[in-house]
Each structure stands twice: as structure tokens, then as C-alpha cells.
């Protein structure tokens, strides 16, 4: 009689998704009310599933984690832009988004800071692996982030959100390409 053991990758992925589901519960029940933390948690949770692939193949490439941090900054920037789009409704409903709780000017400065951090992260990736084909996405992203800075300067948040949507889809395709 042979015993059937679960492959270690399946166990790792199972534990990973138990942790992921637990984190989703914490986010939806506890973090959803915290203005600064909820967007950061949503950004981190949105890319977490991609790391399950690394667990499955038992491969840990530093570049993937650096790229993941860069991608989180893009998702976080989009989450902040969406708050500016919903500012009027949040204010009426007394939802404590960053623009409501900090004020529009301070929240806009923070958004610009996040965008500049994203640009710095992208430049860091480019400087590390200049000739890698996957860095076309990074170059494209840097160009788009400069346009997002310009759009937010003129309060064109819906256009900035559209740019972020394109970046996020391109980032997923690039992530799968890596």
C-alpha cells in the first residue's frame, strides 16, 4: 500500500492562501476604516497572488520582490487618485479618505510624494538591469508617471486614473513575461 503525500509546493501554496484569506478578512473588517492604512493594505493584497507562483516553483528572485514593491507603489498611487475622484461623495458621507481627513492640498502633496517614490523605484530598477528587455515597461511607466504628475497638478484625476489603469494592466502582462 502506497501512501500519498501532498507535494511541498501544494502545502506551501495552501498555507499561503490561508494567510491571504485571513489578511483579506482583516482588511475588510478592521483596516477598511483606517484612512492611510486601507489603501496600502489594498495595494499589497492586490499583488499578493502573484507571489503564489514563486511558491509553487520554489523560486525566489530578488528582482521579483523589487518589481513587486514598485508595482505596489503604482497600485497605491491609483488608490489615492481614486480618492480624489470620490472626494465630494466622501465628504458628504463623512468617509475619512485622505483628501477628507488631511485636506486636499496635503493629500495632493502626499500623492505627489508617492508618485516620486514610484519614479525613484523605477529608476532604481533601470539602473540595476539597464539592458533587460522587461525594462521597456519601466521606461513606459516613468513616462506615464510624469504625465500623472502633470494631470494631478491640473486636477485631472479621471485622466490620471485612466493612465494608472493602463499601467497596471501593462504591469501584469510584464510580470507574467518576466
Image (cartoon, rainbow, N blue to C red):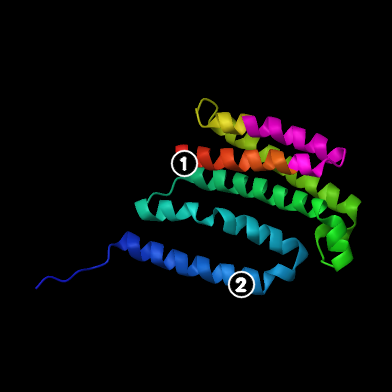
Q: Residue at x 85, y 67 (%)?
A: 93
Residue 46: horizontal and vertical position, in percent? 58, 55
The residue furthest top is: 131
Residue 61: horizontal and vertical position, in percent? 45, 45
Q: Helix, strand or loop at disc 1?
A: helix
How many numbered badges does the structure rendering display? 2
Instruction: Report whether residue 105 is seen.
Output: yes
Can you tell which quarter of the image residue 167 is in? top right
Q: Helix, strand or loop at disc 2?
A: helix
Of residues 88 and 14, the one nearer the viewer is: 88
Instruction: Report whether residue 101 is seen.
Output: no
Above or below, 107 against 30 in this view is above
Image quarter of the N terminus: bottom left
Could you tell me how far apart the alpha carbons at marks 2 and 1 are, in whole angstroms?
28 Å
Q: Give the labeled residue for mark 2.
A: 26
Residue 57: horizontal and vertical position, in percent? 35, 51
Q: Residue at x 74, y 47 (%)?
A: 114
Of residues 75 and 121, the one nearer the viewer is: 75
10 Å crowding of disc 2: few (<14), some (14-19), many (20+): few
Amino acid at each position: 500500500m502506497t501512501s500519498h503525500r501532498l507535494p511541498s509546493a501544494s502545502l506551501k501554496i495552501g498555507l499561503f492562501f490561508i494567510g491571504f484569506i485571513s489578511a483579506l478578512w482583516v482588511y475588510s473588517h478592521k483596516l477598511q476604516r483606517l484612512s492611510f492604512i486601507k489603501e496600502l493594505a489594498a495595494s499589497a493584497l492586490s499583488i499578493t497572488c502573484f507571489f503564489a507562483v514563486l511558491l509553487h516553483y520554489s523560486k525566489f528572485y530578488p528582482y521579483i520582490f523589487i518589481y513587486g514593491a514598485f508595482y505596489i507603489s503604482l497600485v497605491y498611487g491609483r488608490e489615492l487618485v481614486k480618492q480624489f475622484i470620490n472626494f465630494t461623495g466622501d465628504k458628504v458621507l463623512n468617509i475619512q479618505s485622505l483628501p477628507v481627513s488631511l485636506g486636499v492640498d496635503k493629500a495632493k502633496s502626499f500623492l505627489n510624494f508617492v508618485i516620486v517614490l514610484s519614479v525613484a523605484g523605477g529608476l532604481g530598477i533601470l539602473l540595476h538591469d539597464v539592458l533587460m528587455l522587461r525594462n521597456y515597461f519601466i521606461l513606459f511607466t516613468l513616462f506615464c508617471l510624469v504625465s500623472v504628475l502633470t494631470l494631478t497638478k491640473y486636477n485631472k484625476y479621471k485622466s490620471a486614473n485612466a493612465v494608472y489603469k493602463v499601467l497596471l494592466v501593462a504591469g501584469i502582462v510584464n510580470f507574467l513575461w518576466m
